[in-house]
Amino acid sequence: MKRCNWGNYNDQMKEYHDTEWGVPVHDDRLLFEFLTLEGAQAGLSWNTILQKRENFREAFDNFDYNKIAAYGEKKVEELLNNAGIIRNRLKIESTIVNAKVLLKVLEEFGSFDNYIWEFIDNNPIINKFKTLEELPPKTEQSERISKALKKRGFKFVGPTIIYSFMQAVGMINDHTIDCFRYEEINQIIRKSVYIK
């Protein structure tokens, strides 16, 4: 079974590649989780983040943005002492800021899902890359979304982080065309678009 090369790194990466990466996500909690984890990944590998994902979920109340928005300095200090996550003050504080900004987005748009997917007209982008080397680190779209998020006050949402986020939550199908998931994801996309 052929998969994107990075998906063969270890069993955890294989599982993530085969079941999650590129599948369209419309659940606000999960979208916020991915936004947080992609930001935490900055300067690190995705494998490092995957290894710590369950710890992140536990430490950040399963990415309940309502709870996170209410975190104070005591909680920040607690998180800074949690060896199970990435102990970076800027990244931890940005998660709290992002939760607060997200609540404002929910007031305005009803859901983060409505807001973020509107940037691509609710229609996932299907690329046709043959090799991983062809995948761009960012695109005009990710730059546009990054700019809009920053304007609202979101942190750790640069265009490269946002492109990774878009790949993860299925706004883009960036599985290489020889990967078994490429066509599976396309079928999921076709069904979801048809349903709408």
Image (cartoon, rainbow, N blue to C red):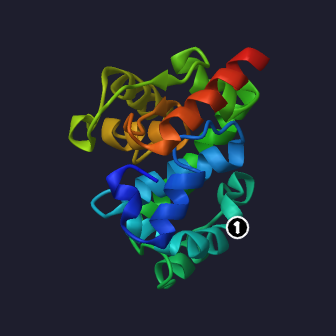
Q: Which residue lies under the disc numbered 1? A: 61
Q: Nearer the viewer, residue 84 or 126?
A: 126
Horizontal arrangement in the rendering, residue 61 relative to residue 176 (left or right): right
Instruction: Report x, y in % for residue 54.
Output: 60, 73
Q: Is residue 112 visible?
A: yes
| Numbered marks: total | 1
Does residue 97 appear in the picture of this structure? no
State the image quarter where residue 27 is shown.
top right
Which residue is at the front of the view, 24 or 99? Answer: 24
**Residue drawn at (52%, 47%) of the image:** 21
Q: Is residue 148 left or right of residue 97?
A: left
- Would you say 110 lies left or right of 149 here? right
Q: Quadrant of residue 6?
A: bottom left
Where disc 1 sits, the SS reads helix
Residue at 31 percent across and 26 percent down: it is 139
Q: Judge whether 72 appears above or below 5 on screen.
A: below
Residue 103 location in percent, x, y?
A: 69, 40
Give the residue drawn at x 54%, y 72%: 76
| Residue type at tag 1 | Asp
Between 157 and 38, the residue placed more toward the observer is: 38
Residue 46 is situated, as x and y percent measured from the top left of the image, at: 39, 61
Q: Nearer the viewer, residue 167 or 58?
A: 167
From the image, which quarter does the C terminus lie in?
A: top right
**Residue sitting farthest toward the front:** 1
| Percent of width and height locating residue 47 | 39, 67
Q: Residue at x 27, y 60 (%)?
A: 43
Judge the density around disc 1: few (<14), some (14-19), many (≥20) Cα neighbours within 10 Å: few
